[in-house]
Amino acid sequence: MPELLKLPIIDLSSPDRISAANSIRQACIEFGFFYIVHHGVDKELLEQLFVESSKFFSLSVDEKMKLERKHRRGYTTMYSEKLDPSSNNIGDSKESFYIGPLEDETTLRLNQWPSIDFHPSWRLTMELYYQKVLNAGERLLSLIALALNLDEDFFQKIGALDPPMAFLRLLHYPGDLVGPNEEVIGASAHSDYGMITLLATDGVPGLQVCRDKYLEPRIWEDVLHIEGALIVNIGDMMERWTNCLFRSTLHRVMPKGRERYSAAFFLDPKEDCVVKCIESCCSATSPPRYPPIRSGDYLRERFRVTYGY
């Protein structure tokens, strides 16, 4: 049985920013995961987020498929994704809905929305949550910059957030699935591709992390739900940026016999932002492990491998 993982809790409202940054540095080196509290997303909005998410996922498949994913926005069906290619199951037992950037009018038009006639408050709720969690993510990135011994506006100065490529993904894991000859997995083992992910959950357990991705057999630890907190994890791009100082940790979602909802907010840099080893993370004895690459090129290749496009 997996152990319970005790992750650090970071208070985004703390006046002692250096102490908060030091705590983040330790968390990113040791776990690649931590909680944030006082992030500006209130309890009522979190509750409404999952109410509206449930409304959409309770629709018939035919209705949901009217908003089938295009341009990385919209609905994805059960088993359409297999995050761990080595897994022997038919696909991950989850369905999801993607909402892309809201800042630019051109990219905003690419988003798809359920009919306002049937879901009058759906879009408003999602846009409000998106803006609130984006603000929390940008505040967090200033602390991450301090944690890397950089100016707190480092990510702004290099154009990573001008504007960022941020996607909200609503996730639904049905609770009554049984695989006849294979293990049922909600989300198979993977690390996130981008910069940072901010995750809200409805309190149903299932999220597990593996701190040592190279150890066999893998040791999985359960992540506890803390009411009102968001779970943050470091992505592969941030690991690359920091020359592997900060770890992008393997994680998965295992069914617990109960329906589960979550919302993952992927905060990634502007597409033409160049990701190259941060100076404070390399030296003569620890040279850069990866060549510079544009954020958009890196992410497109990762999606091509996962989704085949």
Image (cartoon, grey):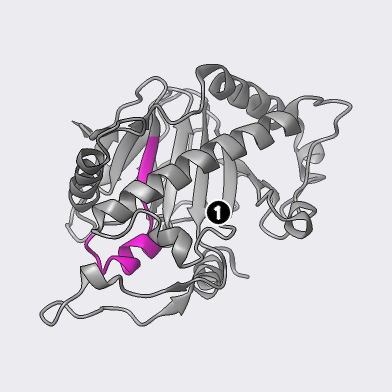
Left or right relative to 60: residue 281: left
Asked whether, in this view, residue 241 is left or right of residue 19, the answer is: right
Mark 1: few, some, or many residues within 10 Å (few <14, many ≥20)?
many
Q: Inspect this view and state whether residue 23 appears.
A: yes
Q: Which quadrant of the structure image shows residue 44?
A: top right
> Helix, strand, or loop for circle 1?
loop
* Residue at far right of view: 117
At which x and y percent is residue 71? 71, 60
Residue 199, by quadrant, is top left
Residue pushed farthest top?
A: 44
In front here: 305 or 225?
Answer: 225
Question: Residue 102 at x, y = what percent?
Answer: 69, 48
- Where residue 260 sits: x, y (%)? 50, 28
The answer to whether 74 appears left or right of 82 in the picture is: right
Q: Which residues are magenta?
A: 231-245
Q: Quadrant of the C terminus?
A: bottom right
Q: Which residue is mark 1?
A: 81
- Could you tell me which residue is drawn at 46 percent across and 56 percent down? 83
- Above or below residue 63? Residue 227 is above
Q: Which residue shows up at 43% across the image and 43% down it?
A: 139
Q: Nearer the viewer, residue 87 or 133?
A: 133
User: Which residue sits at x=29%, y=39%?
Assistant: 34
Instruction: State left or right for residue 219 relative to residue 81.
Output: left
Rendered position, 111 above or below 223? below
Residue 152, placed above or below residue 237:
above
Residue 159 screen position, x and y as percent: 51, 65
Against 263, is 298 above or below?
Answer: below
Badge 1 amino acid: Glu
- Residue at the left extreme of this rendering: 285
Look at the image and say whether residue 238 sits in the magenta stretch: yes
Do we see residue 181 in this rendering? Answer: no
Name the residue nearer the viewer: 235 or 10: 10
